[in-house]
């Protein structure tokens, strides 16, 4: 097992890693819309926040030697399911044709008042 840490994604703010690889599978920690340079929550619409989360996950995927085409499963946590359609459009546009399995759930709250958090599982081909 090895841990993945990318300077292009927010540093872990607790006792966890951005990602862990076991065998040829990457598991990421949930990512909220933190700017990796400032470690501040990116304010704005669900589209803006979703884009930042996907950029953070993209950095972790690249650091692990993977890509969106190798993502097996994502889990999306929304503070409000009324944001589903806008999140889904942004997600679809960003993934550019990749269609991993996905679960989307509404949660009572997310860290720092974020509107969205996403985690993923991906294959690593090395």
Image (spheres, rainbow, N blue to C red):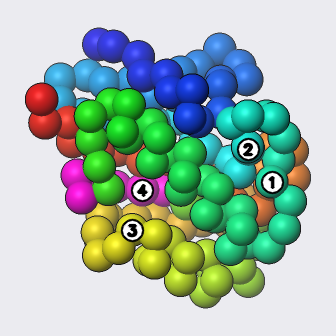
Q: Are marks 4 and 2 in contact (CB under 8 Å)?
A: no
Mark 2 residue element: loop
- Residue 72 shows up from this direction: no
User: How far is mark 3 from mark 2, CA to CA?
Assistant: 19 Å
Query: Which of pointers 3 and 2 lies earlier in the amino acid sequence?
Result: 2
Which percent across, then down, holds residue 54? 53, 56
Please give the residue where the numbered disc 1 appears in the rendered image: 42
Q: Are marks 1 and 2 in contact (CB under 8 Å)?
A: yes
Q: Is residue 110 magenta?
A: no
Q: Residues within 10 Å of mark 4 (few under 14, many from 20)?
A: many
Query: Which of pointers 4 and 3 lies earlier in the amino acid sequence?
Result: 4
Which residue is located at x 36 percent, y 39 percent?
62
Q: Magenta region: which residues? A: 69-75
User: How far is mark 4 from mark 3, CA to CA?
Assistant: 12 Å
Which percent across, then down, holds residue 64? 33, 30
Classify residue 86 by image quadrant: bottom right
Q: Is residue 73 magenta?
A: yes
User: How far is mark 1 from mark 3, CA to CA?
Assistant: 20 Å
Query: Which of pointers 4 and 2 lies earlier in the amino acid sequence?
Result: 2
- Residue 112 shows up from this direction: yes
Q: Is residue 35 above or below residue 106?
A: above
């Amino acid at each position: 097992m090895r841990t993945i840490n990318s300077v292009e994604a927010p540093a872990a703010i607790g006792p966890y890693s951005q990602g862990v690889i076991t065998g040829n599978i990457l598991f990421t920690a949930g990512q909220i819309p933190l700017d990796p340079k400032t470690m501040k929550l990116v304010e704005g619409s669900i589209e803006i926040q979703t884009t930042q989360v996907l950029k953070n996950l993209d950095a972790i995927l690249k650091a692990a030697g993977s890509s969106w085409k190798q993502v097996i499963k994502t889990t999306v946590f929304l503070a409000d399911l009324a944001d589903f359609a806008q999140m889904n459009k942004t997600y679809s546009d960003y993934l550019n044709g990749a269609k991993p399995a996905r679960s989307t759930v509404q949660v009572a709250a997310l860290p720092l008042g974020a509107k969205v958090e996403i985690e993923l599982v991906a294959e690593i081909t090395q």
